[in-house]
Image (cartoon, grey):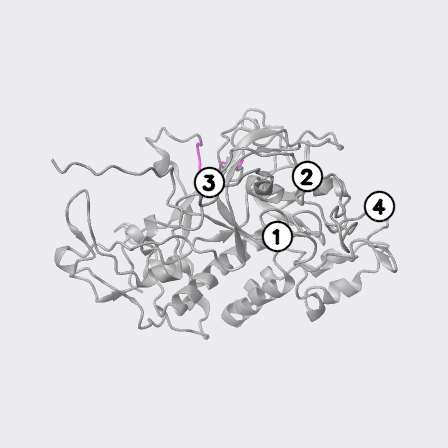
Amino acid sequence: MKRTLLGLSLLCVGTATIFSACSSKTKGVSDKTGWNYNDSRLGGFDVTNYPGQQTGPGLVPIEGGRFTMGQTEEDLTYERNNIPRTVTVSSFYMDETEVANVHYREYIYWLQRSYGADYPEIVAKALPDSTAWRESLSYNEPYVNYYFRHAAYNNYPVVGVTWYQANEYCKWRSDRVNEMLLIKNGMLKKNANQVNEDVFNSETYSAGQYLGTPGKGQRRDLDPNGSGRRNASYSDGVLLPDYRLPTEAEWEYAALGYIENNPEPRTKRRRGEEAVTDRKVYPWGDVRSTRYQGRGASRGEYMGNYSRGGGDKMGVAGGLNDNADIPGPVYSYTPNGFGLYNMAGNVSEWVLDVYRPTSLQDVNGFRPFRGNEFRKNSVEADFTLTEKDSLGNLTKLNVDSNDLAGRYDHDYESYDARSAGDGDSTSGYVYDYGKTTLINNDSRVIKGGSWNDRAYWMSPGTRRFMQAGHTSKTVGFRCVMDRLGSPGFNNDPGGNQFSRRKRNKG
């Protein structure tokens, strides 16, 4: 396949769109050069009229802001592993619910159809670990055999999935959403027979390494020396950003849902107050009870799925408390202020962060995250992208010393920043896994209590960890997507907008 020059389309990774942007015919003039945009007679520089980012399938918008991250309630385990600090989280989108069995089975089906004949190990590697249900002195074999596969559990959260498997699902989902977006806009025709290297991938498509069958809505190439038609690129604002796991800060912020504790939130007619009243213990409100406090038939109902005590998973016959002995359907219980279901109880959830007991206490308070491993696309000597691999993906390399040389605005010394600032580099024994600790760079944070936990773990500030390659019958996940552009939604242009006086033309 012909290699493609590494151009603007790859430098703008992460840009998104709404469907109507795909057919934009913006006319305009550069206010810096005076040259026309979108004019093939003047070079054909293409600038899309970008109306803003749409909400991807399954997501709800989470308006960012500052909050007190950490364990603000009593630390019953005396671990001191989430000391309160003020941080700011950018706006983003988050799955309304946990990823359910039916969603994950769709993923497995697609892998089987695309790779099963030649790469069956890809399918086997993605399957959930159903044996995670097994436990000595318990009869859980029905769940081993049926929980993931049977229609009765379609809308129950998938469990037995490793951190790595959850990340691979996010990548697959990103490509499927973007492929359908292009199909709906007539830019790409349906292809039910794509296999191996001929599968749609957002990066390879934007780089010109996946051609597929172009539709009638394919974009016009305004370059006078171009081919007449071209694939959409990220700079067109056509493709959505990737789905991914949330950072710990994003997950905790979203779980608290403090937007409902703003006494006067912003509307079209008022600015909004920079204030939050009443700190929360649980995601569903400022009360300390796990039961619904309002009037009506629901009064006294459990607002989350958890274990009330040793051996008590659901109450008594005729009076079931949370009405679930294991995880319940993903739309069960009450959503929080952002409209998110089961941010406490049901299943704990994987997040992106590497676990450290003193993580992020003394670092930048903007978008905190531990776990960066910086990578880049593989490029040939002639500065063209390396051809995609046999599975249809671009080749990725670790950032090397040549990329870091001469740069003084970074605080990392290699591509791997997972241990940055944790003391391990100066005290080699601190995180010596298997000798002095069970923590290493493969330890990942899990958040939120599960159906098998006490109410204490449902407070968003509590945190635990598991090895990224381990599975559990109590741990699932949900995805997020970056919000690009302004932090506000509903076509908010960003920044405080004041009326402008007309400029003198002088």
Q: Amino acid at mark 1?
A: Phe
Secondary structure beneath dot 4 equals loop
The tag earlier along the polypeptide, 4 or 2, is 2
Q: Is residue 249 visible?
A: yes
Q: In the image, what residue occupies the spot 54% across and 70% down?
A: 116
Q: CA distance from mark 3 to mark 1?
A: 37 Å
Q: Which residue matches tag 1? A: 477
Q: Tell me, yes or no, whether the two marked residues, 4 and 2, touch with CB atoms within 8 Å.
A: no
In the rendered image, which quarter is residue 319 located in? Answer: bottom right
Q: In the image, what residue occupies the spot 48% across and 40% down?
A: 90
Residues in magenta, as a range: 412-418
Tell me the quadrant of the picture where the C terminus can be found.
top left
User: Residue 340 versus residue 479: which sits nearer the camera?
Assistant: 340
> Residue 314: where, in percent of width, then height?
82, 54
* Furthest residue in direction front, as rendered: 269
Q: Which mark is residue 28?
A: none
Q: Is residue 433 above or below residue 392?
A: above
Q: CA distance from mark 2 to mark 3?
A: 25 Å
Q: Is residue 405 above or below residue 466?
A: above
Q: Which residue matches tag 4? A: 309
Q: Amino acid at mark 3?
A: Arg
Q: Main SS of the magenta segment?
A: loop
Q: CA distance from mark 4 to mark 3?
A: 47 Å
Q: Tell me, yes or no, whether the two marked residues, 2 and 3, touch with CB atoms within 8 Å.
A: no
* Furthest residue in direction top, as rendered: 426
Q: CA distance from mark 4 to mark 2?
A: 23 Å
On screen, residue 125 versus residue 54, left or right, reads right
On screen, residue 436 versus residue 224, left or right, reads right
Q: In the image, what residue occupies the spot 60% across and 50% down?
A: 163
Q: Which residue matches tag 2? A: 286
